[in-house]
Amino acid sequence: MKIKLLILLFLIFISSISFGQTYSYSKKTVKVIVQSIIGNEYRELTTSAGPYRFVFETPHKGKKLFILLKPNEKMSLGKSWYEFLKDDGFIEMNKILYKKSIYYYTETDEQVTVLISKDSNSIIIFNDDDTIWEFSN
């Protein structure tokens, strides 16, 4: 009887904590899509050195989210986050397979499209201001 009670208490404890994973990237490239004679093209605006950290969490309420930390930035209360809304299939770019998801960004109150490569070597965020942030190593 005591063993069953201990197992039950352990399961309740495990289900009440957050689970998370952090990915770090050494480079952020900001791009825009421009229209040209041959169609839409990506143009690079800036490149910044990292590390940029994506802290993915699933809090005890079950909502998936992530927080983007810039170089030398620490986790803090009130930090804006991206809340998962839905998966939207897969997309292939430059022979790399990405999982496409829609997130709600709390800083701008807008939905953004997030692409995460299958091998987690890059993350691309399509922002509501028409900029594209590409994080890679």
Image (cartoon, grey):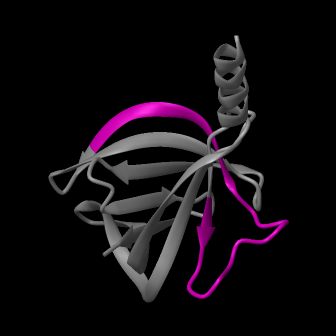
72 in relation to 52, above or below: below
Magenta stretch holds residue 13: no
Q: Is residue 124 left or right of residue 53?
A: left
Q: In this orientation, which residue lies closer to the viewer: 85 or 119?
A: 119
Spot occupied by residue 68 in the image (x, y as percentages of width and height): 60, 67
**Residue ID at (30%, 75%):** 137
Furthest-left residue in this view? 95
Residue at the image position 39 percent from the left and 51 percent from the top:
116
Tell me where residue 90 appears, x and y as whole percent: 33, 36
- Residue 44: which quarter of the image? bottom left
- The image shows residue 95 at horizontal and vertical percentages of 15, 52
Check the picture and name the quadrant holding the N terminus: top right
Residue furthest right in the image: 78
Q: Residue at x 76, y 55 (%)?
A: 106
Residue 32 showing in the rendered view: no
Closest to the observer: 17 or 118? 17
Query: Where 108 falls versus 86 (above or below)?
Result: below
Write the residue at 47% across / 68% down.
Answer: 133
What are the residue bounds of the magenta stretch?
A: 67-91
Q: Is residue 89 magenta?
A: yes
Q: Nearer the viewer, residue 13 or 1?
A: 1
Q: Position of residue 18 (x, y in %)?
A: 66, 45
Residue 55, quarter of the rendered image: bottom right
| Left or right: where 100 falls relative to 79 | left
How many marks do you count on the picture? 0
For residue 126, above or below residue 91: below
Residue 53 in sight here: yes
Residue 132, compared with residue 137, is above or below; it is: above
Q: Nearer the viewer, residue 6 or 75?
A: 6
